[in-house]
Image (cartoon, rainbow, N blue to C red):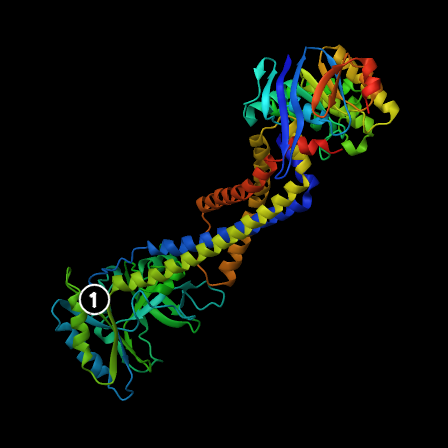
Amino acid sequence: MLKMNEVSKIYRTDLIETHALSNVNLSIDEGEFIAVTGPSGSGKTTFLNIAGLLERFERGDYYLDGENVANLNDKKLSQLRNEKIGFIFQGFNLISDLSLYDNVEVPLIFRGIKASERKKRIEEALELVGLASRMKHYPAQLSGGQQQRVAIARALAGKPRFLLADEPTGNLDSLMARQVMDLLQEVNQAGTTLIMVTHDNELARRAGRNIQILDGELTDITKSQLTDLAV
Amino acid sequence: MAIKHILSLILKQKSIALLIILQIAITVMIVSNTAFISYATLQNWLIPSKLEERQILNVTTRVFDTSTDVPALIEKDIQAIEKVPGVIAASYAGRELVLNSLGPGWTIFKDTQPETDYRVFGYFGLDEKGADVLGLELVEGRKFYASEYIKGDETTKNAGVMMISEELAKSLFGDSSALGQSVYISRQRIAHQVIGVYKGKMLGEGATYSQQPYHSGIVPEVIWGNRQRVNYLVRVEAGVSERVLEDVETALYHTDGRMVDRVEFVGRAKKRLWDGRSTFALTMAGISLIACVVTALGIVALVSFSVSLRKKDHGILRALGASKGQVMWSLIKENTILVFIGLVLGFGLSILLYYFLMHNVRVQSVVEIPLLVGVAIFTWLVSTLAVYVPAKEAAKVSPAQVTKSS
């Protein structure tokens, strides 16, 4: 379903080259829940951005549902991102000037989904995250946890194959974090592949599979290694 | 994004939206009115004079010796001109054809009531041969009797009779006959009786400028008063060469105390007049261009500012699957909504300015719907071009960079 062969990402300036990811090899099956851990600056977010088609990479091949995305143009990458991937960011990244309903609707419009179908999906998604009654509210009227739930609803409304979460509970208190994590786990159990970047070992333990990134190199680890290696 | 989302974003940035709308509205007001004025001006270019422009000459001379016997000079000049090969007849003309501009008193009334509407018109004093030289064609009434002509330097005299153009007659009297009717010239309401109605000709610029090109009148007067100008109209044979101009000038040249200013075909005089008009229209187009450039720069600045404020939103849209083209298109749609509102406001302001100019400034202008449509399309194109650069920048926002920040 998701396969990376020797994927490398290098950031260049006039003076230095930084190898953010080095020869990453990875295969993820449908329905997996993967937690990606590693110290700050190790390349976790770069990995997630490449997996989510937000950034290009220099070398290697990346197959998403069997399609090599290495040489696709912006339009095709955007389309794949819109149809197959849902994002959940640490900072929520909702559009503050749009209502919750509109925030969830925007990616569906880019996909060309009809209005009646959009309405059904938005209502279902907001219902799932427990915010159906507040769909006309604006993000600023919600707590951080509620905003993250809206972001999850926005991701789920598109019925993505992959859900990519970058520190989804990083800005939340422990209660909110638990609620959001429970929700993500429910979504995963319903069949959506979940790849989550986190600093939190407790959260990482909830994943079915753990991956560690150190200095741009990616390795599978066990849960017991998680405790020893995490920073 | 859907229109409702774009409207939401516009409403959240009211100040920028309002500035863009105002800029569009003011531009539309300026460009529409310069277009109206240019169009009306150039339209006059196309009005046929209905004069035989290659068979009538304008001759203008200036008498600078105050002791000159003007009646004798006129008689001598006409004889000299008529001896030139190719010349059929020559006539004294009080004013120049085509080029003559109107004075403030060039108005005609059909009665002496204070509130009566007036018509702007051009009127010309001609001698006995004048009607034939001009090729006037009567549709009603008669030409002047020999006894009706008055000549001399006494400017307070008037003949009391006149011929008027068919269009002026209809404008003053509708379907009733103008023959025998009294008309009153200038604010002094100098009475004249209409004795003939002729098919309209474009005689003077002033009437044309007032968009009444065929409103004219002719009086049987050869009154030079204390003016230095002594002008002639000359009818020449069809197909005559331009040499006739030189020959006429030579015939008038050897007279002491007088100089010949110009001998030219009426067609040439008309062209010179219209050349001036086209320069005016070009100036108007230049003003429009400046207004458009200022607006375009303003839109670039405002949209760039707006884009910088919404950089994160554009990155989020990209992360959610919007292609660069879709981000650009959403900004162009947003701009189109603002342009549309600006156009509606601008058209209202255009009409107000049009009425202001028509009532307060002596300017020829005409509201033309196709011109408004053209201005609308042009304004949209200019503003879309102006939005293109900042929209392209917005589409370049890296979603990975923008979404990284918390």
Relative to B119, A106 lies left or right: right
**Residue at the image position 65 percent from the left and 30 percent from the top:** B317
Mark 1 neighbour density, 10 Å: few (under 14) some (14–19) many (20 or more): many
Residue at x-position 48% and y-position 53% = B288
Q: Which residue is at the far bottom?
A: B67
In the image, B1 versus B149, the foreground residue is: B1
* Image quadrant assignment for residue B151: bottom left
Q: Which residue is nearer to you in this view: A158 or A69?
A: A69
Q: Position of residue B129 (x, y in %)?
A: 20, 70
Height in image: B349 above or below B112? Answer: above
Q: Is A168 in front, or is B3? A: A168
Most foreground residue, B41 or A223: A223
**Residue named by callout 1:** B133
In this view, B194 is above or below B278: below
Asked if residue B5 shows in the view, the reply is: no
B230 relative to A186, above or below: below
Residue A32 spot, x, y in % from top left: 72, 11
Residue B307 visible within the image:
yes
* Residue type (three-letter) at the residue carrying disc 1: Val
Answer with the quarter of the image where residue B229 lies: bottom left
Return the x and y of residue B267 as percentages of the image width and height: 26, 61
Q: Is residue B366 left or right of residue A98?
A: left
Kindly identify which chain the residue marked by label 1 belongs to: B
